[in-house]
Amino acid sequence: MSEFKYSPSKWVPFRDMEAIEAARKIKREDITKHPNPDFKIEVYEDSEIEWMFITDIFFRIKEAADKGERIVMILPQPWPMYRRVADLLNRARVSCKNLYTFNMDEYANEDGVIAPETWPLGFTHALKKYFYNEIDEDLRPPENQMVGLTNENINDYGKMIADHGGADICYSGPGWTGHLAFIEPDAPEFQADLEEWKKMGPRIATLSPFTIAQNSLHGGFGASGDLAAVPPKAATIGPAEVIGAKHRIDFNALTIR
């Protein structure tokens, strides 16, 4: 067979072929091994991922409520499955008065104007629709305890989380670029050496073409591949908020069906 050599497209954000080849060679039986004992990797069936996410949120809220303690969560959006979390909370009659949630990101336009809560495709809109409004009124937290990014609060967003003691848990899942929230690896707004990068907080970031393509396949945009429907920028938490969380769960569950 003839050998055909080429380099990754310039659009691919990670181009270290030595590291890529090393990752490709990891065997199935070694996939959960990691030199950092605090970095735990577990493998589950695709069908189990959603239920794991739902129940983890539910039990963390319930445990905090049972102890009368505050719980602070950084949440991804805009998943309708938050309705199932709300259903469990309602059935178990769990008070959410001490629940504080912070959305990890929100769309923005080319001028840095962040999408308002009233925009039907926005993440704060989804949080209220699929989670807050689905919790029974007598169990809901005050509405101002479920927070999304806005132009008014973005400069203080990291401090708002820190003032609550930092996040108890940050949930996330990587996009095609490997981003967490909209911390894109090739966004000019996040270009820095590692130590400086780890200290970066919330900001408006430029979305990767890969992210725009991926998100155009989401249900909110009609799962249509309509690239022009996806805003070009987004407000996002920074690495500092993720690193500052007491616990982190990252679901790597992208599938093609």
Image (cartoon, grey):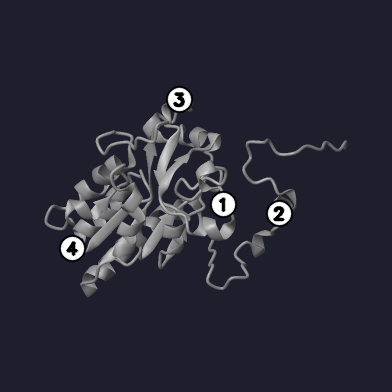
Q: Specify the label residue 19 is tagged with.
A: 2
The reply, left or right, for residue 244 in relation to residue 9 is left
Residue at x-position 37% and y-position 33%: 220
Q: Determine the CA span between mark 1 and mark 2.
A: 20 Å
N-terminal of the pair, mark 4 or mark 2, is 2
**If the image is split into quadrants, where does the N terminus sit?**
top right
Neighbours of disc 4 within 10 Å: few (<14), some (14-19), many (20+): many
Q: Determine the CA span between mark 3 and mark 4.
A: 42 Å
Which numbered mark, 3 or 4, is in the foreground of this view? 3
Q: Specify the label residue 95 is tagged with.
A: 4
Answer whether labels 4 and 2 touch (C-beta < 8 Å): no
Neighbours of disc 2 within 10 Å: few (<14), some (14-19), many (20+): few
Amino acid type at image mark 2 = Ala
Q: Determine the CA span between mark 4 and mark 1.
A: 42 Å
Which of these two is toward me, 107 or 68? 107
Q: Residue 103: image x %, image y %?
A: 34, 50
The residue wearing badge 1 is 192
Amino acid type at image mark 4 = Ser
Label 4 secondary element: loop
Q: Is residue 226 visible?
A: no
N-terminal of the pair, mark 4 or mark 1, is 4
Residue at x-position 49% and y-position 48%: 183
The residue wearing badge 3 is 228
The reply, left or right, for residue 232 in relation to residue 123 is right
Q: Residue 71: image x %, image y %?
A: 28, 65
Label 1 secondary element: loop
Which numbered mark, 1 or 2, is in the foreground of this view? 1
Residue at x-position 41% and y-position 40%: 234
Amino acid type at image mark 1 = Ala
| Up/down of 22 relative to 105, above or below | below
